[in-house]
Amino acid sequence: MAAVAESRGRGAAVVMVLYLLFLMLPIYWLLTMSLKTNREILGVFSLWPQNPTLANYRTILTDPSWYMGYVNSLIYVVMNTVISITVALPAAYAFSRYRFLGDKHLFFWLLTNRMAPAAVFALPFFQLYSSIGLFDTHIAVALAHCLFNVPLAVWILEGFMSGVPREIDETAYIDGYSFPRFFVKIFMPLIASGIGVAAFFCFMFSWVELLLSRTLTSVNAKPIAATMTRTVSASGLDWGVLAAAGILTIIPGALVIWFVRNYIAKGFALGRV
């Protein structure tokens, strides 16, 4: 039996290693491309750069048309995350604590907004923002992304809030807590992991979304994802710069995952993520 168990353990380890290699191969290849020149990328097949160069990263960090794309993306993503969590907290509390006419239908309707493709809403948002002067602004993209991030945050937070006993609310009211004080001082710390998970998913979905952010911006708020799709020049695609931009685009998401990794683990343990 011990031999069988040991054999299974080795087999599982081999499968895990192969799976990790499969996941890391595209990232490794992107990293090597970012350290090569276009001539080497197109002319020679190599597993690592023959003459490593940081020129591609230098181009991005010194060219305003590139690095401002990251700044614009971070601005509207942070704005969207704050707005989504702020709106979703009271909404999720209402769904978890109260029963009212049409509550289940309203909850399902929120989720249907998350199910709909962004292309359905691109034209209405474009015409609306153009008419009220919000086109090509950070707040325009942030509000547009609330369409699918708020339902997601409500769905996640409602599950965490439902796991908190109602007796805590009643005890706080008996002790003289007002609702705002109770919600901030007692209730939010109890669902801190849920807030972390919801903020993570709001950040990630807003960071990687392309269609709405590209449709609703042109110059002043153009995100990095839109900039990366416009790298064609007279000499063709600048593969090295594009690869370097891809590596730099991965970094913010990786940092967010690192900081909220414990919250994500709790979310999976509670079965709501």
Image (cartoon, helix red, strand yellow):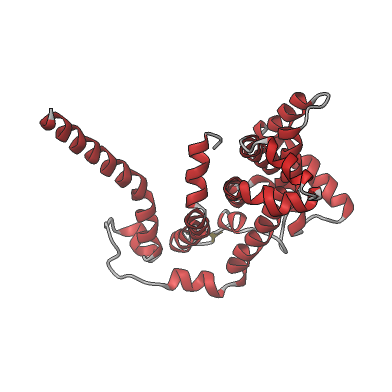
The residue nearer to you, when weighing 119 against 100, is: 100
Location of residue 96 in the rendering, given as x and y in whole percent from the top left corner: 71, 34
Q: In which quarter of the view is residue 40 placed?
A: bottom left
Which residue is pictured at 33% across the width and 70% down the height? 52
Which residue is pictured at 48% across the width and 74% down the height? 58
Q: In which quarter of the view is residue 137 placed?
A: bottom right
Location of residue 234 in the rendering, given as x and y in whole percent from the top left corner: 53, 61
Q: Is residue 200 left or right of residue 106?
A: left
Which residue is pictured at 49% across the width and 53% down the height? 257
Q: Quadrant of the N terminus?
A: top left
Q: Quadrant of the C terminus?
A: top right
Q: Is residue 192 above or below residue 110?
A: below
The residue nearer to you, when weighing 62 against 158, is: 158
Location of residue 201 in the rendering, given as x and y in whole percent from the top left corner: 58, 46
Q: Is residue 228 above or below residue 166?
A: below
The residue nearer to you, when weighing 6 against 35, is: 6
| Total marks placed | 0
Which residue is pictured at 60% across the width and 50% down the height? 192
Residue 136 seen in render: no
The residue nearer to you, when weighing 265 against 242, is: 265
Q: Is residue 194 left or right of residue 242?
A: right
Residue 32 seen in render: yes
Residue at the outermost right position: 132
Residue at the outermost left position: 3
